[in-house]
Image (spheres, rainbow, N blue to C red):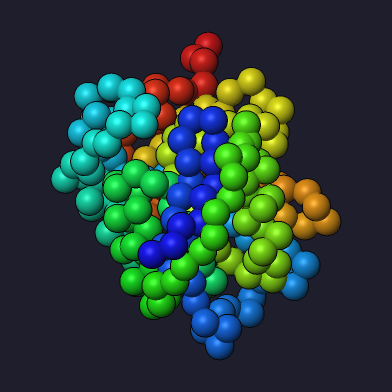
């Protein structure tokens, strides 16, 4: 499979996992808006033990696989994406492939983006420019999500970046803005780590 690379300075968003045919694409997104659904991968053994993964591989644990199933079920019931992108690490790519299969998207190829992001925002703008009037899904990591949030909102912290969370961005009139942040409603029956990415919680009073 060819790859579609989108990078941050922490890790890359790699591999266009799947792409829908034109007849299969949902028509619910305004033609001048690109909707990007950014999904954090499910809980790993290292997340559960509080270890920082960096660019090392760590397997999804039992809860992580349940989270992956829950998020796959939810996204399969929502507006159909045109494409699904993933980080290069196996845990994110496996989750992206589950989502693509459940959304009935045919496996497809992509092309490389050079390392863009400080770069995370530039990477998403690059993806969005290709998908105006469409919905796409990006499966990535807590560090990337935190960088995107802080860059777009100018906030000093992203608060909790939860495993298997859904975070929706719209690009309209060349401006990226969050529509939802850290949505975990689909995990009510599965559970999730309350501390979020690296324990990056909002300061307690």
- Vertical relation: 26 (above or below) 126: below
Question: Which image quadrant for residue 46?
Answer: top left
Q: Position of residue 103 (x, y in %)?
A: 40, 73
Q: Spot the residue most to the right.
A: 173
From this viewpoint, is residue 73 visible? yes
Question: Which image quadrant for residue 59?
Answer: top left
Q: Camera-side residue: 203 or 102?
A: 102
Q: Position of residue 122 (x, y in %)?
A: 67, 43
Taking the spot 63% from the left edge, 79% from the top edge, the residue there is: 27
Q: Camera-side residue: 82 or 40?
A: 82
Q: Camera-side residue: 92 or 165?
A: 92
Q: Spot the residue most to the left.
A: 62
In the picture, the quarter occupied by the N terminus is: bottom left
Q: Position of residue 169 (x, y in %)?
A: 63, 51
Give the side of residue 118 with respect to residue 161, left or right. Answer: right
Instruction: Count how many numbered circles sit on residues in the image.
Output: 0
Q: Spot the residue most to the top.
A: 205
Q: Position of residue 162 (x, y in %)?
A: 41, 37
Give the side of residue 51 with respect to residue 167, left or right. Answer: left
Taking the spot 45% from the left edge, 23% from the top edge, the residue there is: 200
- Vertical relation: 110 (above or below) 19: above
Taking the spot 49% from the left edge, 77% from the top edge, the residue there is: 20
Give the side of residue 152 with respect to residue 11, left or right. Answer: right
Taking the spot 24% from the left edge, 36% from the top edge, the residue there is: 58
Q: Camera-side residue: 10 or 183?
A: 10
From this viewpoint, is residue 166 visible? no
- Vertical relation: 78 (above or below) 15: below
């Amino acid at each position: 499979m060819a790859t579609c690379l989108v990078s941050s300075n922490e890790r890359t968003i790699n591999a266009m996992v799947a792409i829908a045919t034109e007849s299969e694409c949902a028509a619910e997104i305004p033609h001048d808006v690109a909707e990007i659904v950014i999904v954090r991968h499910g809980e790993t053994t290292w997340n559960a033990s509080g270890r920082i993964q960096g660019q090392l591989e760590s397997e999804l644990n039992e809860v992580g696989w349940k989270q992956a199933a829950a998020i796959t079920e939810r996204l399969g019931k929502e507006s159909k994406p045109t494409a699904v992108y993933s980080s290069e690490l196996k845990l994110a790519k496996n989750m992206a492939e589950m989502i693509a299969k459940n959304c009935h998207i045919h496996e497809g190829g992509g092309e490389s983006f050079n390392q863009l992001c400080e770069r995370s925002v530039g990477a998403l703008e690059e993806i969005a420019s290709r998908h105006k009037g469409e919905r796409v899904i990006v499966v990535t990591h807590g560090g990337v999500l935190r960088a995107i949030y802080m860059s777009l909102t100018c906030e000093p912290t992203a608060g909790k970046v939860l495993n298997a969370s859904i975070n929706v961005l719209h690009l309209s009139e060349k401006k990226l803005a969050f529509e939802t942040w850290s949505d975990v409603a689909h995990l009510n029956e599965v559970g999730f780590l309350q501390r979020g990415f690296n324990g990056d919680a909002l300061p307690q009073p």
